Image: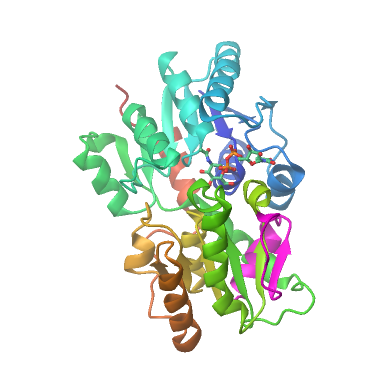
Amino acid sequence: MKYILVAGARPNFMKVAPLMDAFTRRKSAGDGFAVRLVHTGQHYDRKMSDDFFADLGIPEPDINLAVGSGTHAEQTARVMIAFEQVCQAECPDWVIVVGDVNSTLACSITAKKLGIRVGHVEAGLRSRDMSMPEEINRLCTDAISDALFTTDELASDNLRREGVPESRVHFVGNTMIDTLLRCLDRACARPLPSGLEAKRYAVLTLHRPQNVDDPCVLAGILDAVGVVADRMPVVFPVHPRTAKSLDTLRLHPNLRIAEPLSYLSFLGLVAHSRMVLTDSGGIQEETTVLGVPCLTMRPNTERPITCEIGTNRLVGTDPQRIREAALAVLDNGSRPHRVPEKWDGHAAERIVEILLDGHPVSG
Ligand code: UD1
């Protein structure tokens, strides 16, 4: 058997790392199969890619498609053209994709049309918001996948409702949390940036096109975050997309702008923080496991379990609502929370076991 594992953008790398690790351990134990790691190059800056490979100990990709940035159609098409050649040369039995970025969609379609089985890690998440490119990527990838690995039962239920046969749905847990649990001690041992004290600062991340591409929308959100900055430093590692809109804005003096952080530095920063304000998907899950209050500045989430039992709260992008929610967290702290089932550090092992031993039904 031959497996191709695909990584493309920053949030993919934490999901791919434990899978590579689990495959490698099975190989060392004497199992006969081959794995190739393909990096599409959707993210390519050192701080968005190489630093993550170094922090997470992911081996050098066997192949880098170096597609770079572009419109959605350009980027997706470039990945498809380059990945088709890889599949034709490598003839894998399975292509394993993770998450919901353009590379996920591009590689799953390409593989499926060549008759190669597709496994989707983090299947079944739904925001029901078709204005999000990620929702389109998730729906299309899930519709053609042969094995769908879910992070929680709500995601499995979504797939069942969409008519995916039970035999293809595998509730395995969360590979991103595998990585978090593996790295947490190392991350927390790192010194905090100068001037910061544990639990006396907040962390802000913003990169959704709806929130950052229009400087007026971004200004409204940053103005609302000012209620937190009035009380404590707010560390804001800036995504390259956000940096483009930030130049023109006047910023609160307590907003500490930083370049994108490496995985370990960011994890340590979040773990010691008082609260997080974000529009990211993955950070909603990481804060739930860390027990750090999280305000998600989006109208919806594809990860409702983080609101139902975790520390996450959906606050939208109305500045007044953000202000009220932020003040409530500062005054009242965290509410009771639990870690979702199977977010226990063993999701990747379960996936590799199913792939190598379980023979999910193909169609
Ligand atoms: C992508 C994913 C999004 C994910 C996010 C995490 C899609 C549709 N979106 O969004 O789901 O949450 O990654 O970061 O796949 N850029 C750089 N250096 C890089 C990469 C990008 O400067 O290494 C800049 C480029 O100007 C590029 C812009 O950032 O045009 C956006 O990059 P892109 O990969 O298109 O989307 P993201 O916003 O990063």
Decide whether residue 4 is among the magenta residues: no
Q: Is residue 338 above or below residue 267?
A: below
x then y, percent, for residue 349: 49, 47
| Placement of 72 over or under 292, stated as above or below | above
Q: How many marks?
A: 0
Q: Which residue sits at x=34%, y=61%?
A: 305
Is 59 on the left-hand or right-hand side of 340? Answer: right
Residue at left 71%, top 74%?
A: 253
Compared with residue 143, is residue 204 higher up or lower down, i.e. above or below? below
Query: Which contiguous range is marked in magenta?
Result: 246-273
Residue 143 in the figure: left or right of residue 137: left
Location of residue 6 in the rendering, given as x and y in whole percent from the top left corner: 56, 32
Residue found 50% across the figure and 84% down from its top: 330
Quarter holding ligand 1:
top right
Does the image show residue 311?
no
Q: Quadrant of the C terminus?
A: top left
Task: Give the left or right position of residue 222, taking residue 332 as reference.
Answer: right
**Side (left or right) of 122 relative to 67:** left
In the image, 356 versus 103, the foreground residue is 103
Residue at image coords 68%, 51%: 243
Q: Is residue 253 magenta?
A: yes
Q: Farthest right residue? A: 194
* Scheme of image coloration: rainbow
* Vertical relation: 222 (above or below) 349: below
Q: Position of residue 240 (x, y in %)?
A: 67, 47
Identity of the residue furthest to the bottom in this view? 331
Percent across and percent down for residue 299 are 37, 57
- Does residue 232 appear anywhere in the picture? yes
